[in-house]
Amino acid sequence: MRIAYIISAYQHPEQLVRLILRLYTPMDIFLVHVDKRTDDRIFSEMVEGVSRLPNVTFLPRHACFWGDFGHVKATLKGIFRIKSQNLPFEWAVLLTGQDYPLKSNDTIKKFLEENSGKSFMAYFPLPSNEWQGKGGLERIESWHFRLGHRKFCFPDTNRSTSLTPPGAWRKFSSLVPKRKFPAGFQPYGGSSYWCLSRECVDYIYHFVRKQPAFVRFFKYVDVPDEIFFQTILLNSPLRESVINDDLRYIDWKVPDSGSPSILGEHDFPKLAASPKLFARKFDIEVEPGILDMIDRYLLGITETARV
């Protein structure tokens, strides 16, 4: 059982290194994308921290702003690296540098072996009451783009973010048609992170190469990493193999905040009782003790084996 871990990171070198070391086996591969906006000193610490591990690769960097296509692009770089180098794997797991396993490597691999041929991804058809507003349709029906560090939606009823005076903006917005979703596809949304079989990864790779117009459409979708991969796979012949579960423990204490809560020691009982394989999100500068607790009580890591 060989796993390809695709990891997106931008901060906390020690935490990224610790994540990789916990998941590391000589059979597995790690493809890491670090946000181009991350300071070069921090990036160098990340690289140095895993330099002795032969199967960890850092992907070419680009800027990743929250909610833009950069996160999808980073994941696709990982998938294309796997395929272009014909790297051996049975599963691909998408993580962030602030994720952490709740189960040992043996348990993770046993679970995946027992679910051979399946993939795990949280999903729901759009529109959905899972998301506020128009149930997610506003993410795909308007143009979402950036000018510098500012994010814009076009058309947008929130005139504070518009590029034109309020009166002209209202008049112009009424004339702009909604964006048309790629023909023949039902949009799906869900969690950004997943565990996919080789068959699903292969399908995504070939689909993206054959459907450049589909990819271009998503470059102007809001938070496309929560829609792009779901839409591809849930409209594919492999849709019956996709289990509606991302295998992540995530606590959204503040609904619609845009970011999950940082997990701490007080969350440990829930983490210990969870059947999920991974959890997010962790921050060693805010809650440093929780990873030690997971190591000691869930992963069986001794003091000498810790980072």
Image (spheres, helix red, strand yellow):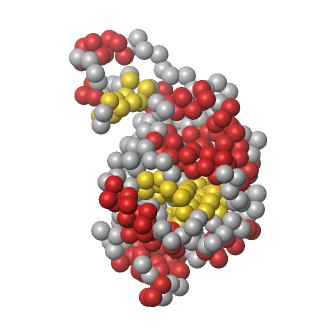
* Residue name at image x 68 percent, y 37 percent: 207
253 or 107, nearer to the observer = 107
151 lies above or below 12? above
Q: Using the rendered image of the protein, determine whether residue 245 is visible from the camera's viewpoint.
A: no
Q: List x then y, in percent, for residue 94.
A: 56, 56
The part of the image, by quadrant, that contains residue 109 is bottom right
74 lies above or below 26? above
The part of the image, by quadrant, that contains residue 303 is bottom left
The part of the image, by quadrant, that contains residue 239 is top right
Q: Quadrant of the C terminus?
A: bottom left
Horizontal side, residue 251 vs residue 78: left or right: left
Q: List x then y, in percent, for residue 178.
A: 48, 20
* Marker count (numbered): 0
Q: Quadrant of the N terminus?
A: bottom right
123 or 23, nearer to the observer = 23
* Residue name at image x 30 percent, y 37 percent: 149
Q: Using the rendered image of the protein, determine whether residue 208 is visible from the camera's viewpoint.
A: yes
Q: List x then y, in percent, for residue 78.
A: 57, 50
Q: List x then y, in percent, for residue 14.
A: 38, 69
* Residue name at image x 57 percent, y 74 percent: 103
221 or 30, nearer to the observer = 30
